[in-house]
Image (cartoon, rainbow, N blue to C red):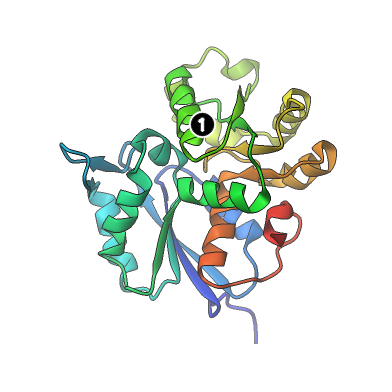
Amino acid sequence: MRDDNWGWQARIGMFIVSSEAVPEAEWWAMCPPHVSVHAARIAAKAPWARWNGDRTAVTLAPDLQRGAEHFAAMRLSAVVIGHSSSSILGGPGWDEAVVEAISGIVRPETVVTTNGLDGRAAMRAAGVRRPFIVLPPWFDGATAEKAMAYYRGLGVEPVGPLSHDPGRGWRDVPHGEMYPQGLGFEQQVEPLYTQIRAACPPEADGVFIAGTGFRCVAILDALERDLQRPVLSANQVSLWHCLRLAGVRAEVSGYGSLFGV
Protein backbone atom coordinates (compact mmCIF):
# COMPACT_ATOMS: atom_id res chain seq x y z
CA MET A 1 0.00 0.00 0.00
CA ARG A 2 1.20 3.50 -0.82
CA ASP A 3 0.29 6.76 0.91
CA ASP A 4 -2.48 8.46 -1.06
CA ASN A 5 -2.43 11.68 1.00
CA TRP A 6 -6.03 11.16 2.04
CA GLY A 7 -6.97 13.83 4.58
CA TRP A 8 -8.53 11.59 7.19
CA GLN A 9 -7.43 13.94 9.98
CA ALA A 10 -8.41 17.11 8.18
CA ARG A 11 -9.26 18.44 4.74
CA ILE A 12 -8.64 22.15 4.25
CA GLY A 13 -10.03 24.26 1.43
CA MET A 14 -8.10 27.36 0.40
CA PHE A 15 -9.11 30.16 -1.94
CA ILE A 16 -6.01 31.46 -3.78
CA VAL A 17 -5.16 33.85 -6.59
CA SER A 18 -5.79 32.18 -9.94
CA SER A 19 -2.31 32.87 -11.32
CA GLU A 20 -0.24 31.97 -8.24
CA ALA A 21 1.71 28.78 -7.57
CA VAL A 22 3.34 29.79 -4.28
CA PRO A 23 0.47 29.16 -1.81
CA GLU A 24 -0.08 25.52 -2.74
CA ALA A 25 3.66 24.81 -2.96
CA GLU A 26 4.30 26.26 0.49
CA TRP A 27 1.30 24.55 2.07
CA TRP A 28 2.28 21.18 0.64
CA ALA A 29 5.84 21.67 1.92
CA MET A 30 4.61 22.34 5.47
CA CYS A 31 1.53 20.14 5.62
CA PRO A 32 1.67 17.21 8.09
CA PRO A 33 0.63 13.67 7.11
CA HIS A 34 -3.05 12.80 6.89
CA VAL A 35 -4.06 16.41 6.13
CA SER A 36 -5.01 17.32 2.58
CA VAL A 37 -5.26 20.73 0.91
CA HIS A 38 -7.80 21.59 -1.78
CA ALA A 39 -7.56 24.86 -3.73
CA ALA A 40 -10.15 27.01 -5.47
CA ARG A 41 -8.65 29.63 -7.73
CA ILE A 42 -10.00 33.19 -7.72
CA ALA A 43 -9.48 35.64 -10.58
CA ALA A 44 -11.38 38.56 -9.04
CA LYS A 45 -9.65 41.78 -8.01
CA ALA A 46 -9.03 42.42 -4.32
CA PRO A 47 -10.95 42.46 -2.13
CA TRP A 48 -12.74 39.30 -3.19
CA ALA A 49 -15.99 40.44 -1.57
CA ARG A 50 -17.44 43.94 -1.82
CA TRP A 51 -19.17 45.88 0.92
CA ASN A 52 -22.77 46.92 0.47
CA GLY A 53 -23.67 50.62 0.81
CA ASP A 54 -23.82 50.75 4.62
CA ARG A 55 -21.01 48.23 5.20
CA THR A 56 -23.25 45.77 7.04
CA ALA A 57 -22.57 42.84 4.70
CA VAL A 58 -20.46 41.81 1.72
CA THR A 59 -21.27 40.35 -1.67
CA LEU A 60 -18.90 37.59 -2.74
CA ALA A 61 -17.20 37.82 -6.13
CA PRO A 62 -18.78 35.29 -8.54
CA ASP A 63 -15.80 32.91 -8.58
CA LEU A 64 -15.54 33.07 -4.76
CA GLN A 65 -19.26 32.27 -4.53
CA ARG A 66 -18.83 29.40 -6.97
CA GLY A 67 -15.79 28.04 -5.15
CA ALA A 68 -17.63 28.12 -1.83
CA GLU A 69 -20.52 26.19 -3.37
CA HIS A 70 -18.08 23.56 -4.64
CA PHE A 71 -16.42 23.34 -1.23
CA ALA A 72 -19.83 22.76 0.37
CA ALA A 73 -19.88 19.23 -1.03
CA MET A 74 -16.36 18.27 0.08
CA ARG A 75 -16.71 17.59 3.84
CA LEU A 76 -13.96 20.05 4.68
CA SER A 77 -12.70 20.72 8.19
CA ALA A 78 -11.75 24.35 7.46
CA VAL A 79 -11.80 26.86 4.63
CA VAL A 80 -9.52 29.89 4.37
CA ILE A 81 -9.44 33.01 2.21
CA GLY A 82 -5.74 32.72 1.38
CA HIS A 83 -5.27 36.31 0.26
CA SER A 84 -3.54 38.96 2.38
CA SER A 85 -4.54 41.75 -0.01
CA SER A 86 -8.27 41.06 0.37
CA SER A 87 -8.06 41.34 4.15
CA ILE A 88 -5.91 44.48 3.92
CA LEU A 89 -8.00 46.26 1.28
CA GLY A 90 -11.30 45.08 2.72
CA GLY A 91 -10.57 47.06 5.86
CA PRO A 92 -12.07 46.87 9.36
CA GLY A 93 -14.75 44.23 9.72
CA TRP A 94 -14.19 42.71 6.27
CA ASP A 95 -12.73 39.46 7.57
CA GLU A 96 -15.67 38.82 9.86
CA ALA A 97 -18.20 39.76 7.16
CA VAL A 98 -16.73 37.42 4.55
CA VAL A 99 -16.49 34.61 7.12
CA GLU A 100 -20.20 35.04 7.82
CA ALA A 101 -21.06 35.02 4.10
CA ILE A 102 -19.06 31.89 3.29
CA SER A 103 -20.20 30.11 6.46
CA GLY A 104 -23.73 30.38 5.11
CA ILE A 105 -22.71 28.36 2.03
CA VAL A 106 -20.38 25.62 3.26
CA ARG A 107 -21.29 22.79 5.64
CA PRO A 108 -22.16 23.86 9.22
CA GLU A 109 -19.22 21.91 10.63
CA THR A 110 -16.69 23.62 8.32
CA VAL A 111 -14.84 26.45 10.08
CA VAL A 112 -14.16 29.52 7.89
CA THR A 113 -11.27 31.92 8.37
CA THR A 114 -9.20 34.49 6.47
CA ASN A 115 -5.51 35.23 6.15
CA GLY A 116 -6.01 38.37 8.23
CA LEU A 117 -7.68 36.50 11.09
CA ASP A 118 -4.98 33.83 10.87
CA GLY A 119 -2.26 36.45 11.25
CA ARG A 120 -3.95 37.98 14.28
CA ALA A 121 -4.35 34.58 15.95
CA ALA A 122 -0.72 33.66 15.22
CA MET A 123 0.72 36.92 16.55
CA ARG A 124 -1.29 36.53 19.75
CA ALA A 125 -0.21 32.91 20.19
CA ALA A 126 3.45 33.74 19.53
CA GLY A 127 3.37 36.78 21.82
CA VAL A 128 4.30 39.19 19.03
CA ARG A 129 3.21 42.75 19.82
CA ARG A 130 5.60 44.80 17.66
CA PRO A 131 5.96 42.87 14.40
CA PHE A 132 8.42 44.00 11.75
CA ILE A 133 6.20 43.98 8.66
CA VAL A 134 7.76 42.72 5.42
CA LEU A 135 5.78 43.32 2.24
CA PRO A 136 6.03 41.87 -1.27
CA PRO A 137 7.60 44.09 -3.93
CA TRP A 138 4.32 44.23 -5.86
CA PHE A 139 2.63 46.18 -3.02
CA ASP A 140 2.72 49.87 -3.99
CA GLY A 141 2.98 52.73 -1.51
CA ALA A 142 -0.76 53.11 -1.04
CA THR A 143 -1.20 49.39 -0.37
CA ALA A 144 1.72 49.48 2.08
CA GLU A 145 0.02 52.27 4.02
CA LYS A 146 -3.23 50.31 4.13
CA ALA A 147 -1.32 47.23 5.27
CA MET A 148 0.21 49.08 8.21
CA ALA A 149 -3.19 50.52 9.14
CA TYR A 150 -4.74 47.05 8.89
CA TYR A 151 -2.17 45.46 11.19
CA ARG A 152 -2.56 48.28 13.70
CA GLY A 153 -6.26 47.45 13.64
CA LEU A 154 -5.42 43.89 14.73
CA GLY A 155 -4.20 45.25 18.04
CA VAL A 156 -0.44 45.25 17.44
CA GLU A 157 2.10 48.04 16.95
CA PRO A 158 3.71 47.24 13.59
CA VAL A 159 7.24 48.37 12.77
CA GLY A 160 8.44 49.16 9.25
CA PRO A 161 7.46 48.20 6.69
CA LEU A 162 10.26 46.66 4.65
CA SER A 163 9.35 46.43 0.97
CA HIS A 164 11.45 43.64 -0.50
CA ASP A 165 13.81 44.68 -3.29
CA PRO A 166 13.60 41.95 -5.95
CA GLY A 167 16.74 43.11 -7.75
CA ARG A 168 17.89 45.28 -10.62
CA GLY A 169 15.86 43.56 -13.28
CA TRP A 170 12.62 44.52 -11.54
CA ARG A 171 13.25 47.99 -10.14
CA ASP A 172 11.86 49.80 -13.19
CA VAL A 173 8.79 47.56 -13.48
CA PRO A 174 5.60 49.16 -12.10
CA HIS A 175 4.29 47.40 -8.98
CA GLY A 176 1.15 46.23 -10.70
CA GLU A 177 3.11 44.68 -13.57
CA MET A 178 5.58 42.65 -11.51
CA TYR A 179 3.40 39.58 -11.07
CA PRO A 180 1.97 39.61 -14.62
CA GLN A 181 5.53 39.84 -15.97
CA GLY A 182 6.59 36.74 -14.05
CA LEU A 183 8.04 37.81 -10.71
CA GLY A 184 5.84 35.30 -8.93
CA PHE A 185 7.82 32.52 -10.58
CA GLU A 186 11.23 34.17 -10.36
CA GLN A 187 11.33 34.95 -6.63
CA GLN A 188 14.54 34.08 -4.79
CA VAL A 189 14.47 33.52 -1.04
CA GLU A 190 18.18 34.13 -0.36
CA PRO A 191 18.06 37.92 -1.05
CA LEU A 192 14.86 38.15 1.00
CA TYR A 193 16.58 36.43 3.93
CA THR A 194 19.52 38.83 3.71
CA GLN A 195 17.32 41.93 3.53
CA ILE A 196 15.14 40.91 6.49
CA ARG A 197 18.12 39.98 8.66
CA ALA A 198 19.85 43.29 7.90
CA ALA A 199 16.78 45.51 8.30
CA CYS A 200 14.96 44.01 11.30
CA PRO A 201 15.04 46.73 14.00
CA PRO A 202 15.87 45.88 17.62
CA GLU A 203 12.52 47.19 18.88
CA ALA A 204 10.60 44.58 16.85
CA ASP A 205 9.70 41.49 18.87
CA GLY A 206 8.92 39.41 15.79
CA VAL A 207 8.70 39.43 12.00
CA PHE A 208 5.54 39.14 9.90
CA ILE A 209 5.95 38.50 6.15
CA ALA A 210 2.70 39.39 4.41
CA GLY A 211 1.43 38.11 1.06
CA THR A 212 0.40 34.55 0.31
CA GLY A 213 2.06 34.81 -3.12
CA PHE A 214 5.35 35.87 -1.48
CA ARG A 215 7.73 32.90 -1.43
CA CYS A 216 9.42 32.73 1.98
CA VAL A 217 8.69 29.70 4.19
CA ALA A 218 12.06 28.12 3.32
CA ILE A 219 13.86 30.83 5.33
CA LEU A 220 11.65 31.08 8.43
CA ASP A 221 13.74 28.75 10.60
CA ALA A 222 17.01 30.40 9.58
CA LEU A 223 15.65 33.86 10.33
CA GLU A 224 14.39 32.76 13.74
CA ARG A 225 17.80 31.37 14.66
CA ASP A 226 19.57 34.54 13.54
CA LEU A 227 17.12 37.10 14.90
CA GLN A 228 16.10 35.17 18.04
CA ARG A 229 12.50 36.22 17.49
CA PRO A 230 9.38 34.57 16.08
CA VAL A 231 9.12 34.83 12.30
CA LEU A 232 5.66 34.46 10.80
CA SER A 233 4.50 34.38 7.19
CA ALA A 234 1.15 34.54 5.45
CA ASN A 235 0.91 30.91 4.33
CA GLN A 236 2.46 29.59 7.53
CA VAL A 237 -0.06 31.35 9.79
CA SER A 238 -3.01 30.19 7.68
CA LEU A 239 -1.95 26.55 7.72
CA TRP A 240 -1.22 26.75 11.48
CA HIS A 241 -4.59 28.34 12.23
CA CYS A 242 -6.54 25.94 10.02
CA LEU A 243 -4.89 22.98 11.74
CA ARG A 244 -5.79 24.39 15.14
CA LEU A 245 -9.37 25.12 14.06
CA ALA A 246 -9.63 21.54 12.79
CA GLY A 247 -8.34 20.19 16.10
CA VAL A 248 -5.13 18.80 14.57
CA ARG A 249 -1.96 19.06 16.70
CA ALA A 250 0.35 17.17 14.35
CA GLU A 251 4.07 17.93 14.51
CA VAL A 252 5.39 20.32 11.86
CA SER A 253 9.11 21.04 12.00
CA GLY A 254 11.43 23.25 9.99
CA TYR A 255 8.97 26.07 9.33
CA GLY A 256 9.15 28.26 12.40
CA SER A 257 8.40 27.94 16.09
CA LEU A 258 4.73 28.86 15.57
CA PHE A 259 3.81 25.23 14.96
CA GLY A 260 5.00 24.39 18.47
CA VAL A 261 2.67 26.94 20.08
Check the image and report above or below for 71 versus 129: below
Asked whether the viewer can see residue 177, the reply is no
Identify residue for label 1: 182
In terms of depth relative to the viewer, which is nearer, 50 or 44? 50
Amino acid type, callout 1: Gly
Residue sitting nearer the eye, 126 or 133: 126
Give residue 249's position: percent from left, percent from top: 64, 71
Vertical relation: 185 (above or below) 168? below
Is 170 or 165 nearer to us in this picture?
165
Q: Residue at x 38, y 51 (%)?
A: 41
Q: Is residue 146 left or right of residue 224?
A: left
Question: Which residue in the rendered view is the most extreme toward the right?
Answer: 226
**Residue 27 point in image, percent of width and height:** 58, 56
| SS state under label 1 | loop
What residue is at 47 percent from the left and 50 percent from the top? 117
Residue located 55% across and 52% down the image? 121
Residue extending furthest toward the top: 172
